[in-house]
Image: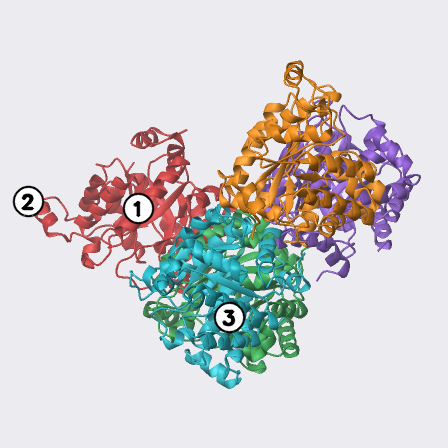
Chain colours: A orange, B cyan, C green, D red, E purple
Amino acid sequence: MSTQRVKEILSWYASENPGVKANLARLMNAGRLAGTGKFVILPVDQGFEHGPARSFAPNAPGYDPRYHIELALEAGCNAYAAPLGFLEAVAGDCAGDLPLILKLNNSDSLTKTSEPCSAVTASVEDALRLGCAAIGYTIYPGSAERNTQLENLRELILEAKAVGLPTVVWAYPRGGGLSKEGETGLDVVAYAAQIAAQMGAHIIKVKPPTAFLEQPEAKKVYEKFDLPRATLSDRIRHVVQAAFNGRRIVIFSGGEAKSTEAVLAEVKEIAAGGGFGSIMGRNAFQRPKPEALALLRAVMAIHADGC
Amino acid sequence: MSTQRVKEILSWYASENPGVKANLARLMNAGRLAGTGKFVILPVDQGFEHGPARSFAPNAPGYDPRYHIELALEAGCNAYAAPLGFLEAVAGDCAGDLPLILKLNNSDSLTKTSEPCSAVTASVEDALRLGCAAIGYTIYPGSAERNTQLENLRELILEAKAVGLPTVVWAYPRGGGLSKEGETGLDVVAYAAQIAAQMGAHIIKVKPPTAFLEQPEAKKVYEKFDLPRATLSDRIRHVVQAAFNGRRIVIFSGGEAKSTEAVLAEVKEIAAGGGFGSIMGRNAFQRPKPEALALLRAVMAIHADGC
Amino acid sequence: MSTQRVKEILSWYASENPGVKANLARLMNAGRLAGTGKFVILPVDQGFEHGPARSFAPNAPGYDPRYHIELALEAGCNAYAAPLGFLEAVAGDCAGDLPLILKLNNSDSLTKTSEPCSAVTASVEDALRLGCAAIGYTIYPGSAERNTQLENLRELILEAKAVGLPTVVWAYPRGGGLSKEGETGLDVVAYAAQIAAQMGAHIIKVKPPTAFLEQPEAKKVYEKFDLPRATLSDRIRHVVQAAFNGRRIVIFSGGEAKSTEAVLAEVKEIAAGGGFGSIMGRNAFQRPKPEALALLRAVMAIHADGC
Amino acid sequence: MSTQRVKEILSWYASENPGVKANLARLMNAGRLAGTGKFVILPVDQGFEHGPARSFAPNAPGYDPRYHIELALEAGCNAYAAPLGFLEAVAGDCAGDLPLILKLNNSDSLTKTSEPCSAVTASVEDALRLGCAAIGYTIYPGSAERNTQLENLRELILEAKAVGLPTVVWAYPRGGGLSKEGETGLDVVAYAAQIAAQMGAHIIKVKPPTAFLEQPEAKKVYEKFDLPRATLSDRIRHVVQAAFNGRRIVIFSGGEAKSTEAVLAEVKEIAAGGGFGSIMGRNAFQRPKPEALALLRAVMAIHADGC
Amino acid sequence: MSTQRVKEILSWYASENPGVKANLARLMNAGRLAGTGKFVILPVDQGFEHGPARSFAPNAPGYDPRYHIELALEAGCNAYAAPLGFLEAVAGDCAGDLPLILKLNNSDSLTKTSEPCSAVTASVEDALRLGCAAIGYTIYPGSAERNTQLENLRELILEAKAVGLPTVVWAYPRGGGLSKEGETGLDVVAYAAQIAAQMGAHIIKVKPPTAFLEQPEAKKVYEKFDLPRATLSDRIRHVVQAAFNGRRIVIFSGGEAKSTEAVLAEVKEIAAGGGFGSIMGRNAFQRPKPEALALLRAVMAIHADGC
């Protein structure tokens, strides 16, 4: 039975059918954070996105698809997210062990593109036959390939909804129109969260923003209204606000591998700012398993604290 | 994470996709019997099948669709099974609270038919949009309407499987070719379980059989091989054997309302005979709630004991 | 690589696409009779057709679906044929071990009908996903339900062919227009084989005929031309002739359980008459396994002798 | 290049698409009667309709499906018509040798029915993949199963037309409402030809009618207007008139086997009455091949004479 | 019956239906390496990819499509892979002789493209009607046409799976973003294998990699962790690891024609590094047949040795 907090979060999705809500509930009722409305998700798409050696050489057991789902299970994550191949390699043997999120599009680092647009590499039908609780999809706000991305997303969200599957959107600003610094600038990240929410995403994943402001028109507003952005928790709060004033689930990625202290410090700010959780890939699976488990549980403890 | 017993049961369904296995696991990992591989399911289709007053007047709160899902939840059932209307009335508010089984066909008592054949009253698409973990379907082995029933069932099982939903088959022998006594005769009930299993049912629901033997050709065999049928547990064991030698989940209905002692005595025999559980409607929802909860928990305790 | 005999048999099916021919070759290249163009197939649909106790009580391990595929494999049968449930219970674990034939329609003995017509209980799509080498279908020539049966068969054959699957037709004369004796009468069995061949069956299964003649118009012809029918081998030869002069594969069922001597005597006549093999269910799986293996191998030896 | 006569006949089918007309032309431009607008067709569906021994015992090579197509080819028939199985057995090896007509429905003599209705045993798709020039279909005007028959025919004609295939309708009055004598009565046969023409048949096959008149209302008219019916050629002329005043191709069957003289005498009347040809099965394939060839060629000579 | 090793390999594909597993088993149970879990496949798509003279002039019998399937059969290959035309030219006559793999996309050398993307030249439906055991598909990781390629592949894999066909992916890095040397660089080849695995490929074909490292980010990792890459067997081991830690079948192409010694030396390294086998085209079919047979059998002996 769902807690009051889970029921409250589900109430924000009142236009959805019971199937979508039930799967959102499944995500919130799994793992060590069950019932808190907080999330720690293990995503492992780096093999596809960055290549196998860059992803798994630091902790070689990670070449094996079984490693990650076991890590997510032992750590008590809410869900495990991966591309088709990684999920197919484990879903038959681990059916029902924890919620799975099938990433429906993926990019790689062999193809050079200034205007990124991931390929659609799996389908809603795949998500159903693999027993997934949600689909995932990456958009690159700022890419000139915007329309292809958003139009594919629109169709997949609609199709997924009809069969009871919610959608997690990875929103990573990138493209010819953005500076490198701008990709994680506060105005840009908040804007990316807004776009995902407006597209109908049920869960939105963004990077923790910096205090940098990319767009002159936006900068004027941030400065005019003196929007707080000094601390990361200020900025997290702003991004959550940008996603329908906190009525959409927004979770934050950990980004590149870094020290345990750095990760936990960042997570504390995310929690303090009202973030709904963390989606932590490389910082988890590139550590030796005991360290990874300790880290994930520490992250969970921080998020649980905020409840 | 599933227990060894749950994993063992899932291994019997090795031809299924991970989606079907994940939903079977969901059913086995919910409620007070989670992880035991045993089932207590609350079914409430009597409003449709027998009419509202016959079903709900004995305990008037049962007119309200919310009553039953709350009863199932509070008691700790593995699942709640009902026709479309009852599920739609609660699925939006209780999304994710417990596994739901949508009964895809139903019959009523206003139409008199010697050769029964339920109407298909809901679809696999409904089951998905309502967030169900399985579909349910009733067959009447012995009915002259056999082909219509089995051909509809075949299509629904195939369609459900493709989207990761398992099928629960209610197998109730009935029809012009069977005597009243024969409907619950051992040979006939075992045969009904076999038919459901051969159709591809994942979970089979039958009535506890009597020692009566209906078919002359079958009677000869039971007598020649002296198949034990004196006690109910003997007969349960035979029915479970008839469903692929115990490699399909077979659960038993409670039938008409009766005394608590009678119910529990029957359940003990079901458990002793290797039955996988009980599906108990009228004996639960027609009692006042505290009594119903006490009874359901006593039934669960008996089934849990056998693990 | 196929033998000359297998190539010769395949040449009779010159209108078929390579997929259908490849699956016919798979059936002829499996087991101890591989390459001979002869067949011994284990069919186990009696659980559905006659009920579980009548089928499996004589040899209780047969309640378990794994028993039969193991029996077929150990004996070296060309194929194992069964309804959906029995195949699903083993196909995932035994993938590729031996050719499977999915029986797409089935009848049961609980429903009483003077005009038999099996229910369609599985589909061509099921046959593909289960990795089958052929579909099977039962017709009851003589039944007033002829049109339903033949029209379903026509659609299934056409659909199966398009995806490379051949069809095995069980042709069992039965129905209000036939006497009990007539069901196995020579004229009637030969006619049933002809109907199956004209429908496009690739492999035809009939019962060994008696010398009885049912139809007055046919009787006149048999007598006028003095068609030999004194011995079973004479009658087998006539039935094979009736199936396109031997250019369609015709195999013969063993019928009810009987003594080993009786079975082998009958098989010798079948082989002598040019029958392409035996499809032997009850006489195999109702014996203890060592006896069943011995019998099946003796049957194979007889068929191999005739090559 | 088509002759003037063939062009003239094609002009009667001006509403048809070029594909249908091209196949009608193929039928008229094949064999010894090519270009004359006359037809001699070999049909072999008796194996299905009457059983194998009744059909083929009189001339045993006929059990072999290759026999008939060779007979049709050597004799110089316009086309060979048969059920699915017989065509499949030869079409691959004889592709393009002569026009084939696939009979899409068939009946058998094992099932007793007072109200005949053939089963649909093949499809337009089969006709295409087998390279046929036309489809064939039997109706039984007078049967209580009229609507099923005509509605199936309507759909098949429409479907066939769309892919360029013309339809040959076998119109055999039969059913509870007709006396045995009436089945070949002039009024009834003429009426059957009219029904076939009204259904959209391109070629109509009927039996040569007797002078008997079945229906009282019709009889009055035949007598009032003194319609000539004394000789077979009178009656043939009337039937051809009944099929759109000669603007539909009407051909006549030979019926039961009889003496060569009787056959040729009948054919002469058919030709004299303006019949478009003969469709001759048993009288051809039940004779030894040299006799059959001689007979078919004599029949062709008679029809050619009338040009 | 499959060996333990074949069963072990099949267990890696637990999310697949029995049809896909059965066809994987067919590939592993054919030819001289049957049961070892090792592969030698003959692919002949060079006529399409490089043109006929470049492909077949060195050994002129290779212009004839029958030559290659006979070579594969005589040598005892696990399978023969080719584009539609080559398979259609032989599948009818060689039905069932050995497993066929239909290459569903192909490129030619007449069209110059810096960003390669093969045309989809055949379909899953073709694979079924030709009786194939798998489909094949080429991707060019690194091509700017990535999304078209991967999106077509995703749909074909899903469609093939549903009908029981596994997919072999040829992964050849190529495109504007890669240097010529980089196309076979270790980091790039390992990455290509990972992409194929993540797309759901069941069997992955790559080229034996060189020690070159193309991508600066990857290079840092290879150097930091000192990943062994001095010998070809080191590099093969790394590529197999990159394909789900050895839980996907990875086979290696022979590349351009070279001396027998060079081929065998390379194959020994492939076997030593844990490669699952060789897919050898030009080095086989461009040699005179006796030499080709000797070479293929020597290659098989090396792979068999490693079992």
Quadrant for the C terminus of chain E, please: bottom right
Q: Are discs 1 and 2 both within one chain?
A: yes
Q: CA distance from mark 3 to mark 2?
A: 67 Å
Q: Of callouts 1 and 2, which one flags the residue occurring earlier in the amino acid sequence?
A: 1
Above or below D115: residue A173: above
Dot 3: what SS? helix
Residue under pointer 3:
C46
Query: What chain is tagged by disc 2?
Result: D
Residue under pointer 1:
D151
Query: Would residue B47 appear left or right of C67 to someone viewing this image?
Result: left
Q: Please tell me in which quadrant of the rendered image residue D49 appears.
A: bottom left
Residue D146, how many percent across, how many down? Answer: 26, 51
Dot 2: what SS? helix
Residue E143, how many percent across, how many down? Answer: 73, 27
Query: What chain is tagged by disc 3?
Result: C
Above or below E73: residue B203: below
Residue under pointer 2:
D224
Q: CA distance from mark 1 to mark 2?
A: 35 Å
Quadrant for the N terminus of chain E, please: bottom right
Above or below E126: residue C256: below
Label 2 neighbour load within 10 Å: few <14, some 14-19, many 20+: few
Q: Please tell me in which quadrant of the rendered image residue D242 appears.
A: top left
Above or below C283: residue E140: above
Residue C57, how many percent across, how many down? Answer: 54, 78
Q: Residue at x 76, y 45 (%)?
A: A298
